[in-house]
Amino acid sequence: MKSKISHIEINVLDYRAAIKFYDLIFSKIGFIRTNCCKEWTAYSDGMSKIIICPTDERFIKHGFHRKQAGLNHLAFNASNKKEVDSFYNEILIPNSVKVLYEGKPFGDEDYYAVYFEGPDRLKIEYVYAPNYFDTDKWPSNIPDDFDPYKEI
C-alpha cells in the first residue's frame, strides 16, 4: 500500500489574507477550495487536503518562522519545467509575490523549482523533479552519514 497524505493544516495570522493568497496559488496547481468557514478553509486536489485555520488569539503574538521547530515548507509537484515557468509568469509575477533565492525558477533536469512565501512567511515550493522518488537517483542515492541509534 502506498501512503497518501490525508491533509495538512496550517494556522495563519491573517485569515482573510491567507485565503486570498491560497485561492490564487492553489487554483493554478490543481487544488480547489471546497469549504470556507469561520473556523477553517479547505482546499483539495481530490487526493489530499490543505486546511487553513485562523490562529487562536492567544498564539498570534508568537508569529511564525520556518526555522523554528515545526513545518518548514510545502512543496508541490509540477508535471514539467514549463509548468513551473508558467506558474511563475502567470501567478507570482502579476500578483507581486516575492520569489525567494534566485528571484525566479532555477535548477536543472533533475530538480527545477520556484520558491516563494505565503502571507505568514511559510515557504512554498513548486517543483519539477521527475526522479525524486526513484531510489537510484538523487537525492535518494546520497550516502547515509548519520546513525540515530549510535551513541556519540
Image (cartoon, helix red, strand yellow):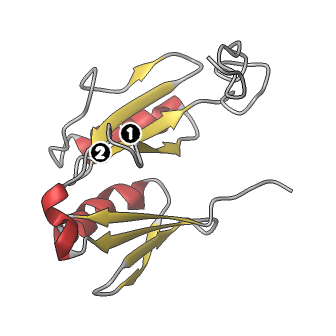
From the viewer's perspective, tell me whether residue 120 is left or right of residue 130.
Answer: left
In this rendering, position of residue 149 left or right of residue 96: right
Residue 113 % position (x, y): 44, 30
Q: Residue at x 69, y 58 (%)?
A: 4
Q: Which element carries disc 1, helix, strand or loop?
A: helix
Q: In this view, does 89 lie to the left or right of 96?
A: right
- The image quadrant where one finds the N terminus is bottom right
Question: In the picture shown, does residue 10 fall above or below 121?
Answer: below
Tell me residue 13's x, y (percent): 19, 64
Rendered view: 1 above or below 91: below
- The type of residue carrying mark 2 is Glu
Circle 2 residues within 10 Å: few <14, some 14–19, many ≥20: few
Residue at horizontal 19 percent and vertical 55 percent from the top = 63
Q: Do the residues labelled 2 and 1 touch (CB within 8 Å)?
A: yes
Could you give the CA–CA distance between mark 2 and mark 1, rounded to whole angstroms? 6 Å
Query: What residue sits right under mark 2 in the picture?
Result: 90
Disc marking residue 86: 1
Regarding residue 23, the answer to whether it shows in the image is: no
Where residue 66 sits, quadrant-wise, is top left
135 over 74 or under it: above or below:
above
SS category of the residue bearing label 2:
helix
